[in-house]
Amino acid sequence: MYETKFCKVKYLQKHNAIFCQWKQFCKGDDYKNPFEYGLKLIHEKNATVWITDTTNGFENDSEDTIWLFESFMPKIIESSCDTIVFIIKKDSFLKDEIDGQTKGLSQYFSVKQIEELEDLQII
């Protein structure tokens, strides 16, 4: 498991998933390192699902967004991951951003939005 004051990343065996739970705003290495750790777990566990909990999420720094799409996404597209799940409340201020990401990521993955981790059982 990887945990800082900004993020927690762990493997959920029950779902063969990487669970990335954001705690507060961060940028730079504090933003990138959880993703890199999660990618390492994907390879170690042959995980097929990436879950991002946006409950305490935030709008990304523009440089981190560029890094995410140009550097990280090509790596995860080539991995065993085939499903992306966002935990997001219907009234979240991030809803429009996550809807946009859902649309873009749907070219490469099955993408779902749920309100709580427990809802993952219905996918």
Image (tube, rainbow, N blue to C red):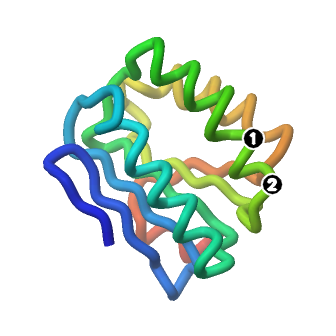
Question: Rounded to the nearest whole Å, what is the CA distance between mark 1 and mark 2?
Answer: 6 Å
Q: List the residue tagged with mark 1.
A: 74
Q: Residue furthest bottom?
A: 14
Task: Give the quadrant of residue 50.
Answer: bottom right
Vertically, is 41 above or below 24? Answer: below
Residue at x 41%, y 65% (from the top left corner): 117
Q: Residue furthest top?
A: 62
Front residue of 113 and 47: 47
Q: Residue 60: percent from the left, percent from the top?
A: 40, 22
Vertically, is 64 above or below 12? Answer: above
Q: Please, what secondary structure does the residue beneath circle 2 have?
A: loop
Q: Please, what secondary structure does the residue beneath circle 1 have?
A: helix
Task: Give the quadrant of residue 78.
Answer: bottom right
Residue at x 56%, y 26% (from the top left corner): 67
Three-letter amino acid code of the residue under disc 2: Glu
The reply to whether discs 1 and 2 touch (Cβ–Cβ < 8 Å) is yes
Residue at x 49%, y 60% (from the top left corner): 38
